Amino acid sequence: MFGALNEISFRRAVAADGPAVVALVESAFRGEGSRIGWTTEADLLDGQRTDLTEVGALIADPRSCMLLAERGGTLVGCVKLVREADAGVIGMVSVVPALQRAGIGKTLLREAERVILSAWGLRRATMTVIVQRDTLIAWYERHGYRRTGITSPFPYGQPRFGLPKRSDLAFETLEKDLGGSSPPEGDPPRVCHGGPDEKKTSSGWTRTNPS
Ligand SMILES: CC(C)(COP(=O)(O)OP(=O)(O)OC[C@H]1O[C@@H](n2cnc3c(N)ncnc32)[C@H](O)[C@@H]1OP(=O)(O)O)[C@@H](O)C(=O)NCCC(=O)NCCS
């Protein structure tokens, strides 16, 4: 097993992290190796979950970020965040399969919500989940997300989203009201921020008024 969760640190991915992020997401979502974890898309989809083009664009776009969880400098998890007008969109929540079931996923989810609420000032988190993934949806429900009943079709015929193993895949939108959450503990997250005294550079956000 591994050490306490408080050893986990978060940072915003930069361009150089792209290949490691793609490898992590692919290993968690698809393929035989992902079955070590407790939830995977391996029974539903083959092919890729993402690629460097998509991850590179997420990292480069100031309206989105890839939040990395590291332990001892090693990547153990990641989550995609996209800033929309009235909500932060969470996606690609991934934990190294062999390290799952130990609380890293919950910690990532909490940090993602903290960024949306404290750094972006948005009181709603949303995500889309494949409706057939009952146990995953139950996990999100245990962490405060509610099913909206709003569905959208899976993008069949577009291999960059994967190769479906069945013909009835669809997404459902889940959402969580973060306004009802307890006030976030500690300082606002320094990642994915872009506040008045922070500046985005090619290597990420840096403070223009160091203190
Ligand atoms: C979803 C994911 C991020 C969770 O990460 P994790 O580190 O395992 O999460 P945690 O350890 O915090 O929580 C594990 C939860 O699974 C539950 N669990 C463990 N084994 C389980 C099983 N066989 N069946 C159902 N639930 C199970 C635990 O009880 C725990 O629930 P709780 O949070 O209510 O206590 C991780 O499984 C993953 O990367 N999955 C593949 C990628 C994916 O599908 N991402 C989500 C889509 S966006």
Image (cartoon, rainbow, N blue to C red):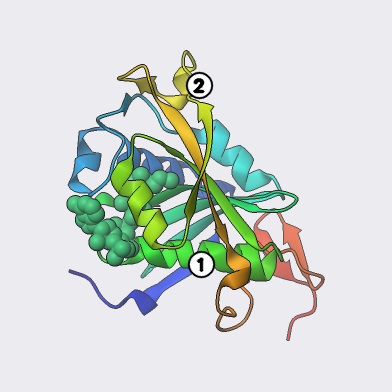
Q: Nearer the viewer, mark 1 or mark 2?
A: 2
Task: Point out the image quarter for the N terminus.
Answer: bottom left
Q: Residue 200: image x %, image y %?
A: 74, 59
Which numbered disc, 1 or 2, marks the residue that appears first in the sequence?
Answer: 1
Task: Point out the image quarter for the C terminus.
Answer: bottom right
Query: Does any portion of residue 74 appear in the rendered image?
Result: no
Does any atom of ligand 1 lie closer than 8 Å to the CB of label 1? Answer: no
- Front one among 74 and 168: 168
Direction from residue 120 to residue 103 in the image, left or right: left
Quarter holding residue 2: bottom left
Q: Residue at x 48, y 58 (%)?
A: 68
Q: Residue at x 49, y 17 (%)?
A: 158
Residue found at the very far bottom of the displayed protein: 211
**How many C-alpha atoms fall within 10 Å of the one at disc 1: few (<14), some, or many (≥20)?**
some
Query: Does any portion of residue 104 appear in the rendered image?
Result: yes
Q: Residue at x 61, y 43 (%)?
A: 58
As drawn, the label of residue 98 is: none
Number of callouts in the render?
A: 2
Whether 94 is drawn above or below 6: the answer is above
Q: Amino acid at mark 2?
A: Pro
Q: Residue 196: image x %, image y %?
A: 82, 70
Direction from residue 68 to residue 5 in the image, left or right: left
Q: Amino acid at mark 1?
A: Glu
Query: Which residue has dot 2 on it?
Result: 155
- Front one among 3 and 110: 110
Q: Quadrant of ligand 1?
A: bottom left
Quarter holding residue 204: bottom right
Q: Secondary structure at mark 2?
A: loop
Query: Which residue has dot 1 on it?
Result: 111
